[in-house]
Image (cartoon, grey):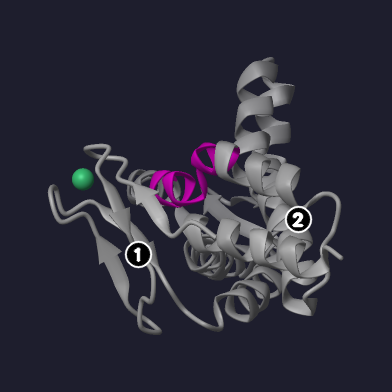
Amino acid sequence: MSTLIACHGCDLLVDVANLPDGSRAACPRCSHFLTRYRHDAISRALAYAVTASVFLVIANSFSFLSMSAGGLESAMTLPETALTLYRFGMWDLAILVAGFIVFVPALLLGLVLVICVPLYLGHPAPWLISAARLLYSIQEWSMVEVFLIGVVVSLVKLAQLADVQLGFSFWAYVAFSITFTLALTTLDRFQCWQMIEQVQKAAQP
Ligand SMILES: [Zn+2]
């Protein structure tokens, strides 16, 4: 099995064989991060992904934030953020918001689970290669942290106009974004492909 990795920064081929547990490799020429080896990366990623899935369900089920001003009160759930945009005729923006904050993260979590479960059990699965390829090609399209920063910035503005209360779902979404980011970063790209190759080689007669 090849242990050579091409640096994304400068294309230098680096041998990352025999990395100690918990250590990371960086390019000797440009210091670009290459890979991080952890013997329990799969079980960690699996635990983070399951936890993130629970938080995502909770984040979509309760009040995200509520506002009151001049005797009027309104509460909003996470799916309603996109639905409200749709009701105001901004259907294209509604699709983008729903896609980037709920559907793409949910798809990524699903992919992490379908990759990690067979790798954890040591059983090769026919979808491993296509699932890993899809995971690493759409990973950049998740805007979970961008959405959270946007919410915090708009809260500062809203607080001057109305009394804003953060709902249970807001905190669940914060917990989701942390566990979701940990699940994705724990499943190191190079190590994941190495493990897929190992599992498939071990199953060959
Ligand atoms: Zn480099």
Instruction: Please state the horizontal and vertical placement of residue 149, each as a whole percent of the image.
Output: 38, 49
Q: Main secondary structure of the magenta part?
A: helix
Q: Is residue 137 left or right of residue 24?
A: right
* Residue 154, percent from left and from top: 39, 44
Image quadrant where residue 63 sits: bottom right
Residue drawn at x 67%, y 20% is 88
Please state the quadrant of the image where ligand 1 appears.
Answer: top left
For residue 115, side relative to residue 100 (left or right): right
* Amino acid of disc 1: Val
- Image point 57% across, 61% down: which residue? 194
Mark linked to residue 16: 1
Please state which of residues 12 and 153 is positioned toward the viewer in this rendering.
Answer: 12
Q: Nearer the viewer, mark 1 or mark 2?
A: 1
Is residue 49 something that shows in the picture? yes
- Labelled disc at residue 103: none
Q: Secondary structure at mark 1?
A: loop
Q: Is 22 left, or right, of 28 in this rendering?
A: right
| Residue beneath disc 2 | 110
The one of 37 and 182 positioned closer to us in this rendering:
37
Q: Range of the magenta residues?
A: 138-150
Q: Secondary structure at mark 2?
A: helix
> Which residue is at a point 75% across and 61% down the rendered structure image?
200
Residue 145 location (% of width, % of height): 45, 51
Q: Find residue 113 and report its image quarter.
A: bottom right
Residue type marked 2: Gly
Magenta run includes residue 146: yes
